[in-house]
Image (cartoon, rainbow, N blue to C red):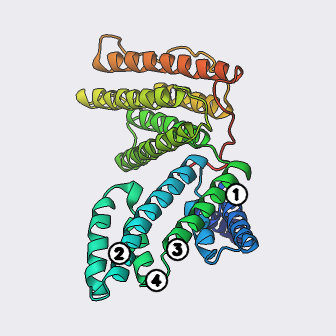
């Protein structure tokens, strides 16, 4: 027993670090984003100093705010930053003009007049920074130079341009690539869920998989928004694949849930471990093909000894048809990439959790 203790300690340490420590380490995608943010901030700092902007720190702050994990998210953040700043600068500038025209008007009243409409505009994500910008322009400019508002808009616009250019040029992360990785992770989770219900696995494990699937679908909805941002900026060719893929994953999610319901309808239903492993393998192979941008190799339907006329047999047959349709979608997309219908992108190296 004494000779086993060092080995047991080593296993414990490896398990502890892999589960408790490693998740907090930056991924390669995280390091790339940190590099983009650092370069954008430095470029903004030296550029504003070179061209003589008086408040160049606004450009630096803007780059740190808008540089995101993907190009699409960076574009969205830049547009929001510019729109909020412009709206706040206009309203704040009007407030400053009012103070200059009538010095008897109390500043708190002007602040109220400026902030109320901006706060109403902030209910829209595009203008969420408008109240802050308006208050800063009004409070910092005071009754002084009206050029302050215009200067701030210029500096933030300058920082936005630098941030987007750095995100476009320095190790760019396209939203399509991130979407594909999240979709591949969903396929793996759906396979794990199907394996659990068919093998009558533990309920807590099934609930954990369901939670992960829900979180992953929330991620891809955000990814689609970022893909649309890149299309709107004409940085990505129009291609229906992202929408087709996500819609089909929703259908597969429903089909897998129906398989689980069919298993629960029959009291004393026996487990199907071989069938569970086969279904899991089908999902995993498609996830792998999606990550590799490779065609899907057709596989035989996994039915085994399930009666076709039973609820479970019907559910499995529907699931198999949806998997075949998924093969068509993936194979069409794989072929289209060789004809320039979708932009190549760099995949994140670490799958999402």
Point out which mark residue 147 bears. Answer: 3
Query: Which residue is situated farthest in the front direction here?
Result: 101
Residue matched to label 4: 140
Query: Is there any visible trace of residue 20 in the rendered image?
Result: no
Residue at (27% x, 30% y) in the render: 268
Q: Nearer the viewer, mark 3 or mark 1?
A: 3
Residue matched to label 2: 95
3D distance between C-alphas at marks 3 and 1: 37 Å
Query: Total number of numbered labels?
Result: 4
Q: Which of the two discs, 1 and 4, labels the residue nearer the N terminus?
A: 1
Q: Secondary structure at mark 4?
A: helix
Residue matched to label 1: 32
Mark 3 surroundings: few (<14), some (14-19) or many (≥20) residues within 10 A: few
Q: Secondary structure at mark 3?
A: helix
Are discs 2 and 4 less than 8 Å apart at CB? Answer: no
Mark 2 surroundings: few (<14), some (14-19) or many (≥20) residues within 10 A: many
Residue at (28% x, 30% y) in the render: 261
In depth, the one of 63 and 267 nearer the eye is 63
Q: Nearer the viewer, mark 1 or mark 4?
A: 4
Displayed quadrant of residue 102: bottom left
């Amino acid at each position: 027993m004494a000779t086993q203790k060092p080995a047991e300690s080593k296993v414990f340490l490896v398990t502890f670090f892999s589960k408790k420590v490693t998740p907090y380490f930056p991924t390669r995608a995280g390091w790339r984003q940190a590099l983009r943010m650092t370069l954008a901030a430095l470029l903004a700092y030296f550029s504003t100093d070179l061209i003589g902007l008086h408040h160049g720190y606004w450009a630096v702050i803007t780059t740190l705010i808008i540089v995101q994990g993907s190009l699409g998210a960076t574009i969205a953040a830049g547009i929001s930053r510019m729109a909020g700043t412009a709206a706040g600068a206009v309203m704040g500038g009007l407030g400053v003009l009012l103070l200059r025209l009538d010095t008897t008007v109390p500043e708190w009243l002007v602040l109220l007049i400026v902030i109320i409409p901006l706060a109403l505009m902030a209910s829209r994500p595009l203008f969420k920074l408008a109240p802050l910008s308006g208050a800063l322009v009004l409070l910092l400019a005071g009754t002084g130079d009206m050029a302050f508002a215009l200067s701030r808009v210029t500096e933030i616009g300058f920082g936005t341009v630098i941030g987007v250019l750095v995100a476009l040029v320095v190790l760019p992360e396209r939203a399509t690539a991130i979407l594909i990785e999240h979709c591949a992770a969903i396929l793996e989770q759906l396979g794990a869920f199907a394996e659990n219900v068919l093998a009558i696995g533990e309920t807590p494990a099934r609930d954990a998989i369901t939670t992960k699937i829900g979180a992953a679908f929330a991620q891809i909805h955000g990814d689609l928004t970022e893909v649309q941002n890149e299309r709107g900026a004409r940085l990505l060719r129009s291609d229906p694949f992202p929408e087709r893929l996500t819609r089909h994953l929703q259908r597969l999610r429903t089909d897998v849930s129906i398989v689980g319901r069919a298993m629960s309808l029959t009291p004393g239903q026996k487990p199907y471990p071989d069938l569970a492993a086969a279904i899991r393998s089908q999902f995993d192979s498609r996830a792998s093909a999606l990550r590799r941008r490779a065609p899907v190799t057709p596989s035989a339907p996994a039915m085994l000894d399930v009666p076709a006329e039973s609820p479970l047999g019907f559910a499995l047959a529907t699931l198999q048809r949806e998997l075949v349709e998924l093969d068509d979608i993936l194979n069409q997309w794989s072929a289209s990439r060789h004809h320039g219908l979708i932009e190549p992108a760099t995949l994140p190296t670490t799958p999402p959790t």
